[in-house]
Image (cartoon, grey):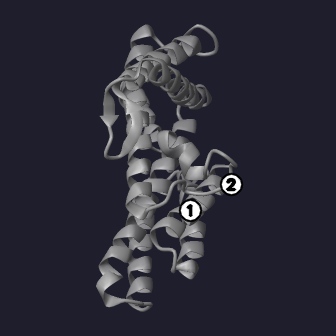
Amino acid sequence: MLGIFTFIGMHEFYRMALPDRTVEAWLAAACGALFIFIPFTGDDRLVLGAIAALFLAFALLFLFRIKDIADAAREVAYATLAFFYIPFLLMHLVLLRQTTHGVQWLFVIMLIVMTNDSAAYYTGSAFGRHKLYPLVSPKKSIEGSLGGLVGSIGGTLLARFTFFPQLTLTDALLTAIFIGILGQTGDLFESLLKRSFGVKDSGTIFPGHGGVLDRLDSIIFAAPAAYYYVIFFFKG
């Protein structure tokens, strides 16, 4: 499923950033989907090797398929950004799954993101008065953002007292705040990209809700945050 989402997400990114690069879009989507399976090899060196290989391959591809020399550097930069933004960050979900209590941590991420989004929406709708970052997302408010973090805390506490007793109260609070903030930042970052590219949604695969990137924007940023918290701080 993650491979499918990565494939679609990469294609959505290229459609927004490089709409005239159809061949490169399909190749990048396929390579990105394969990239996230590297952790199953058990060799961390392959991650760096794959990053180097992908950069070199797409640098050469764009080098010999120039359409407008004035846009060449921008196109290569977008192509590189796509790989780091989507498959590289989402790959951390696979890495997280391989840790102790990996399944529980995946559910914790989902809870943090979903409770954050829901609480932010309802808090912002009811009490939002001060804009959070109007240049990037005019509808988001500081009150909604704070309400979202409270919702994230509720989500981790729910995990703590139901299916994840190994999660201490300190873990619950720290991950809710840390991952919750990064999840909100991921949402803002995707809004920044869409505004920069002049589109409203990344895609139309979810009617009324946009594309895959619109649904995964918070999780993309939350995945590495959760993984590195687990390997460096979690004692469960």
Q: Which residue is mark 1?
A: 12
Residue 169, can we see it?
A: yes
Residue 228, can we see it?
A: no
The answer to whether 25 is drawn above or below residue 82 in the figure is below
The alpha-carbon separation of the residues under discs 2 and 1 comes to 10 Å
Local secondary structure at mark 2: loop
Counting from the top left corner in percent of width and height, residue 62 is at 41, 84
- Sequence-wise, the earlier of marks 2 and 1 is 1
Question: At 41% across and 33% down in the image, what residue appears?
Answer: 140
Query: Mark 2 is on which residue type?
Result: Ile
Question: At 64% across and 15% down in the image, what residue appears?
Answer: 163
Q: Which residue is mark 2?
A: 205
Q: Quadrant of residue 141?
A: top left
In the shown orientation, is residue 162 left or right of residue 55?
Answer: right
Query: Mark 1 is on which residue type?
Result: Glu
In the shown orientation, is residue 36 left or right of residue 55?
Answer: right
Question: At 37% across and 19% down in the image, what residue appears?
Answer: 174
In the shown orientation, is residue 8 left or right of residue 89?
Answer: right
